[in-house]
Image (spheres, helix red, strand yellow):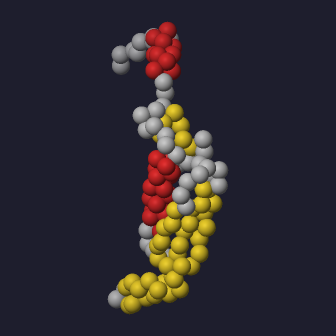
Amino acid sequence: MILEFEKIQKVYAHKDCEHIINSIIVFDDLIETKYVPTNFSGETKYFYLRDKHVEWDTKQKEALQKYLHEWFDELGYDSTNYFIDTDTAEIKQFCSEADVNKILTVNEDAESTSTEEI
């Protein structure tokens, strides 16, 4: 299952974030990023960060990864059998023991080649 959601950004507080750049006090907007599930029943998530933050992309990515894990838990998936791929937002099943045995059998049946000495 791929978790689909709508990402909505808006100014939450206009020029309300005070910070210092080169010893000068600057005021920037506080941005609200809202993640709304569209193909599953999960809690809407909110993330707030100052506009033009130097780590904007990193902080946004970290928040989304956190929310994907929270949704995974909310949906009740067993983490011993499933995991969330945070790059694709897809819930995937770990390989079963039968799948692992198939891979091992194929590898054992493959012809071995030796390397030459240099």
Asked whether the viewer can see residue 83, the reply is yes
Point out residue 117 in the picture as x, y percentages from the top left corner. Answer: 35, 16
Point out residue 101 in the picture as x, y percentages from the top left corner. Answer: 47, 16
Point out residue 84 in the picture as x, y percentages from the top left corner. Answer: 50, 43
Q: Nearer the viewer, residue 75 or 115?
A: 75
Q: Is residue 21 above or below residue 43?
A: below
Give the residue drawn at x 49%, y 43%.
Answer: 76
Asked whether the viewer can see residue 107, the reply is no
Looking at the image, the residue that sits furthest to the bottom is 24
Give the residue drawn at x 49%, y 27%.
Answer: 95
Point out residue 21 in the picture as x, y percentages from the top left corner. Answer: 39, 84
Figure disc tally: 0
Q: Is residue 24 above or below residue 30?
A: below
Which corner quadrant holds the C terminus?
top left
Give the residue drawn at x 59%, y 71%.
Answer: 9
Give the residue drawn at x 52%, y 75%.
Answer: 31
> Picture quarter containing residue 55?
bottom left
**Horizontal side, residue 41 vs residue 73: left or right:** right
Which corner quadrant holds the N terminus?
top right
